[in-house]
Image (cartoon, rainbow, N blue to C red):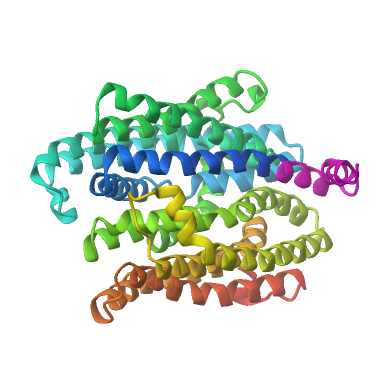
């Protein structure tokens, strides 16, 4: 009975509507996200068993390369989230649909160009030589690369509908669609062995197309129903609205690219400077230890639009209280991370059987990296909501500049292998981890001036 009362209080209407909406979304998102993580844990060993360590390493590396390039949306999606959220908060439907239309058509033009360039590079250049791929696998890898490029292009355009859900503080819907995507891919993994064994092309195509077609279907469905008043059309796309999105979106884009250099190059660096077998080791440790970040992903996605609304209405007291709550949660996750590292050998044994061995030092390094990332993200929630991201952008660019040299130093000079690549990530995050909380403190105390106010 007490548990029921606590749940009711969590998702009920007590307090301000903004807090009630945030709590409700966070509660239901935790449930859906948890199911999604379970599915992720299921298809990792299934994928490893189906492809083997080397082919799985090739796939993960290829995915990282394409994912990196297809983030060249100049921050339009994130800019849309902020500007659309502001328009909705002010009940300006005309401006809201203009932002949606402008974002869709601008992003479509950019992604079509990027996809075309990547397809040319994929077939015209011997890029597979950089990854030390066996010559017999090169044709299969190149055709898979083409499928992933096209599928990701579709996903990046269609995925704008998720930014609308985020801006409307309906992130639980996004998690449900993500769960549906993962579940569909799990079903395909179970079917693939009956079609053809050990096929890198079929496996990669199944995942790429699944992750592209679900958001496409969601967009078509919702823009014909609940989001019909926001449905994008060319007549509502306006140059002045692109400038609004682009001005803020460019900063988000630079930050996003810097984050990609720090977080998404690890697989590539491990494949290039350590070994292809080291890629699944890192990926397994990251997948396992990023479980405790689930709550931070949920909180970040929910409180970003909540902070947009609060800042637009001058509710600094709410922003301070929500930040204190998130900091308490972060301290609790440190304890969880330590426990997870201690029991990790037993978890890997049960989870991966004899397919893969993950050294505990890799788990320790990943745990530190993930904890530092979540610390930074706590303060980015506030900065992103206020739109004061210029200083944050400078800090992330500096971090990105030192990431790869630091990683290579730890590997080549100190001979630390996979751990060295992760230490490069940790070293690069430290400057951001110092600057962000200082700026947030100044913003919430209304003492931000000069660069601290930008």
Magenta segment = 1-27
Residue at the spot 51% in from the left edge and 23% down from the top edge: 217
Q: Is residue 265 visible?
A: no
Is 10 contained in the magenta span?
yes
Magenta segment, prevailing SS (helix, strand or loop):
helix
Rendered location of residue 109, percent (x, y): 38, 36
Quadrant of res 168: top right
Camera-side residue: 313 or 94?
Answer: 313
Q: If the image is split into quadrants, where does the N terminus sit?
A: top right
Camera-side residue: 310 or 59?
Answer: 59
Label count reads 0
Camera-side residue: 92 or 4?
Answer: 4
- Side of 405 relative to 158 (left or right): left
Above or below: residue 365 compared with residue 154: below
Rendered location of residue 152, percent (x, y): 37, 37
Rendered location of residue 155, percent (x, y): 43, 34
Above or below: residue 88 compared with residue 133: above
């Amino acid at each position: 009975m007490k548990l029921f009362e606590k749940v009711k209080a969590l998702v009920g209407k007590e307090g301000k509507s903004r807090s009630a909406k945030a709590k409700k979304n966070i509660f239901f998102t935790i449930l859906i996200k948890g199911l999604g993580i379970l599915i992720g844990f299921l298809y990792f060993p299934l994928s490893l068993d189906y492809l083997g360590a080397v082919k799985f390493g090739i796939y993960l590396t290829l995915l990282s390369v394409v994912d990196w390039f297809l983030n060249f949306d100049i921050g339009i999606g994130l800019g849309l989230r902020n500007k659309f959220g502001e328009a909705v908060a002010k009940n300006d439907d005309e401006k809201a649909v203009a932002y949606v239309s402008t974002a869709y058509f601008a992003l479509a033009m950019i992604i079509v160009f990027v996809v075309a360039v990547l397809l040319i590079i994929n077939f015209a250049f011997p890029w597979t030589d950089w990854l030390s791929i066996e010559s017999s696998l090169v044709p299969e890898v190149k055709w898979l690369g083409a499928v992933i490029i096209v599928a990701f292009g579709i996903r990046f355009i269609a995925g704008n509908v998720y930014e609308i859900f985020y801006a409307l503080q309906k992130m639980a819907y996004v998690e449900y669609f993500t769960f549906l995507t993962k579940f569909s891919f799990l079903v395909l993994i179970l079917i693939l062995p009956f079609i053809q064994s050990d096929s890198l092309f079929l496996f990669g195509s199944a995942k790429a197309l699944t992750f592209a077609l679900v958001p496409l279907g969601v967009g078509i469905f919702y823009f014909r129903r609940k989001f019909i008043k926001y449905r994008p059309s060319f007549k509502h796309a306006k140059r002045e609205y692109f400038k609004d999105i682009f001005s803020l979106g460019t900063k988000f884009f630079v930050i996003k690219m810097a984050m990609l250099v720090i977080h998404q190059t690890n697989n590539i660096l491990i494949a290039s400077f350590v070994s292809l077998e080291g890629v699944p080791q890192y990926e397994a440790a990251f997948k396992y230890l990023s479980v405790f970040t689930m709550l931070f992903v949920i909180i970040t996605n929910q409180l970003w639009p909540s902070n947009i609304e609060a800042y637009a209405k001058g509710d600094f007291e709410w922003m301070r209280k929500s930040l204190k709550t998130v900091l308490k949660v972060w301290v609790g996750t440190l304890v969880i991370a330590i426990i997870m590292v201690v029991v990790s050998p037993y978890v890997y044994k049960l989870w991966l059987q004899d397919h893969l061995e993950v050294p505990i030092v890799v788990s320790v390094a990943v745990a530190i990296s993930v904890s530092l990332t979540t610390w930074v993200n706590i303060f980015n929630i506030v900065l992103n909501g206020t739109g004061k991201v210029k200083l944050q952008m400078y800090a992330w660019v500096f971090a990105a500049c030192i990431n790869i040299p630091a990683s290579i130093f730890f590997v080549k000079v100190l001979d630390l292998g996979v751990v060295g690549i992760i230490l490069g990530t940790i070293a690069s995050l430290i400057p951001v981890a110092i600057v962000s909380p200082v700026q947030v403190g100044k913003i919430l105390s209304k003492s931000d001036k000069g660069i601290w106010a930008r």
